[in-house]
Structure formats: C-alpha cells, structure tokens
Amino acid sequence: MDPYLKSLSLFRRRKYEQCIEICNELLNNNPSLQGPWELKMRAMTQRVYIDDIEAEEDAVTDDPMDTEILATAPKPGTSLRTATAIKAGQRTASSRPRTSTGRPLTGVARPGTIQQRAGTSSLTGNRTALQSGRGNTARNIRLGSASIFSLSDNTFNMSRLNPSVFAMKSTVAKILFQVLYYHEGDVKKALDLCNAVMELNKTEAGWWWLTQKGRCLIAIGNARLAENSLRSSLKLLPHPDTISLLARAYCRIDQPLAALEVCKIGLEKLPNDISLLKQQGRIYELIGNLPTSVRTYKQIIQLDPMNTEALSCISVHYFYNYQPEMALVYYRRLLSMGLNACELFCNIGLCCLYGGQLDLVFSCFQRALRLAISADQKADVWYNISFIGLNIGDLDFARRCLRICISLDGGHASALNNLGVIAMKKENSTKAKMYFNLSKKLLPENDEIKHNINLIENKH
C-alpha cells in the first residue's frame, strides 16, 4: 500500500501517532513533499485538540490598562462580580454552593479547568462533582490528553517561523495557524499569522481569519479589541463559534447582559443551535439566575436528549433544591448512555442516600471508589461516604471516612471542617478548634467555617 494513502487512512481512523511516523519517513526521503507536511500538521493538531470554547470557564479579568470603566457598583444581575456576593442567611432554594471563582457549582467539570484543591471551593457540604477553576487557552493543550505526548518535533522550528512567508500560501496558512494555536500553544505567533494574512487581503480578509484573530486576542486578555474583529466576522457570516467567542469577550469585560443579547440575536439567525443555548445557560449560571439557566438546559434536552452537560446541570439543580429523586432520574439517564465515571456513581450514591434508597448507597460508592484514579477523586468519594455515618448517627464511622479523606488529600478543607464538628459533638473543644483553624487557612472566606469558629469561641 502506498505510504501516503496509508497515512491518510490512519488519520481518518484517528491513529495520529502512527500517521505522524509515516509522514516523518516520507519527509526524511523528500522534504519538499507538500501533502505529507499538511497531513502531519493536521495530525499534530488533532492529537492534542481541545475545543477552547467548551474548555474555558468565563471569568472576569481585571485589565489595569482599561480606561473605559463606567461604574464600580453595577446593578444586581448585570455584573459577574456582584453575582458572587451571596450574603449569609439569604440562600434560597435556587442558590447553590460556589467555587472561589464565583461560579455556582455546575454539573460538569470541563477539560482545561482543573485547579489545585486549596482555595478552589467554598463548599463544606456534599461535592456532587469535582470542583473546577479555569485555565488559559494557551495552557489547555498541556492538560488532559496532551500531557501523555511528547510535543517536541525536530522537523518544526516554530521560533524561526516567519508568518509573512506562509501568509501567501492559503492552503497551508490555516493548517499552520491550528498547529501554532492548539499544538504549540504559541498564541502570539498565531496572532502574527492572522495579521499577516489580513494585511495581504485587506479588502477580503475572510470571516475565518477575523474569528481566529478574535480568539487569539481573547486568549492574551485583550477582549475589547477582540470584539471589533468578531463583530466584523459576524457581518460576513453568523457562525456559532464566532457568536460564542463574542459572548465570552463580553463576559471577560463584565458585560453578561451584552453577552446574552449576542446569544439571543444569534439564535434568531440560527434557531435552536445547541452551542448557543449552552452558552446562554452558562452565562445565566454566572450571574446567579439559576432558574432561567435550568429552563435553558431543559430546552436543550428537548432538542438533544443525550446532551451530557444539560443533563448534568439539571441534575445538580434538582439535588440542591432538595429533590434527589428527580436528580436521580437524570443521573440514571446519563448512566444508560454509557457514562462510567467515578463522579457519576458518587452523585448517584448521594441521591440514593438523601432519597431514602439506602440499599443502593454502598454499592454506588463502591463503584465510585473502583473507578477513582487520582488521590483527589478518592478523597472526594470518602468525604461523601462520611455523610452516610452522619445521617445514621454513626459519628465514629464518619470520622474514620474523613480521616481517610485527609490522608489522601491533606488540603481538603471541607473534611477538616466536618472533623471539627464531630469533635465538638464529642465535647473535644481543643481538637475542634484546631480543625477549624486549619480549614480556615485553606478557605478563609467560607461562612460556615467562620460560624463554627465563632460558635466555639463564644462557648468558651
């Protein structure tokens, strides 16, 4: 079989490593072959590709050079900063625990958003999903699947690449951009390539290059300039990715209502587009409008009954609204779809526990422990198992589970806080105060930990 045709077959079957090896052999024999070069670059991109629109959490960034700030105290519901301010004692049925980034605890942990444990969560209750932070676009390729590959390649020397040379080659320029952005993580070089292409085609730059320029500007933190490029791209073609990127740019400059308006206009041109509806649901979560967010996710379910993000977020909503039976219905649907994850079985176990189906609780947590890979996952599972003991009144069982959790993750503030509560129940004030102080160092802004410390100090 011809080696080039074989490499094409391997690429279509997603065997990218073998495809790259064959392309390297062809290029070693004849470096001027354009087909193997393009195929190799495509394979290198697909090998580490992560959709940064799905992967990145929209968080407000403070730009010290931004002089267009209009108000420091925006109206409630119009800012991502004010949405994070939940006063103690004012939680409603529609509210739920939040991460330290201000985002309500969502139903999914997206790739490229995992943080270290300390300071990532304000929870002292059940963790129904692993907590998430956010990661910059340029670092997404270093996480997840990309971490198992050796990304260096002797046939490419990106530091010596001249974007203006490749900008004239339209067939290679787009492939090269994807390699620079997704594989190399060199956003600045990718932006230089976009500018070089647009400089050559000032009158007809093309919607694709305008969108990619906006993507790069968002990645380097210049959301206001990205807005201009994305608006120009939308005039040429209303593509869902462009609309989602523009909505993200508005979220970065703390204008969630403008982001929602962009999504609304996009849905008028592209009715029932799943990606735009998901973007709307995430923004509603960010501003604290959880009922509207859930209605949006339910609309997604009607259009796509197997959408995992919508099913997970609806499940979390029902769980924190004291309806574990309804949450269990959606989690079982995820299970029937073939999902087999530690977090899913942990969530099902919690729903069974609070729904009164005690015969299924231990089997679910056993499955979760078998599927747990990392120490953090095992720590979260043992933390949730401790609630079995707390619910049946077996404090010794709960304490042992929490101690196992601490042995796996010494920075698990929620477990330390609950150990302090158990110590208070056993009238061991010294040990309780020690646990509370340790948990406060890890989560200094947590209201429950502060309340526990004040309670034990007033008691003595």
Image (cartoon, helix red, strand yellow):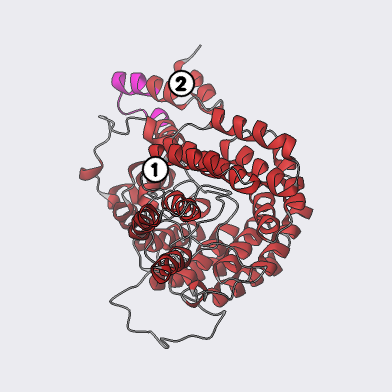
Q: Which residue is mark 2?
A: 4
Kindly indicate the quadrant of the structure image that contains residue 17. Answer: top left
Read off the magenta span.
23-36
Q: For mark 1, what is the residue? A: 141
The residue type indicated by label 1 comes to: Ile
- The residue closer to the viewer here, 322 or 158, is 322
> Would you call the spot at circle 2 few (<14 residues within 10 Å), some (14-19), or many (20 or more)?
some
Up/down of 393 relative to 102, above or below: above
Q: Nearer the viewer, residue 84 or 409?
A: 409
Residue 342: % across, % down: 57, 36
The C terminus - image quarter: bottom left
Nearest-to-viewer mark from 2 and 1:
1
Magenta stretch encompasses residue 410? no
Q: Amino acid at mark 2?
A: Tyr
Image quadrant in which you'd find residue 244 = bottom right
Residue 69, can we see it?
yes
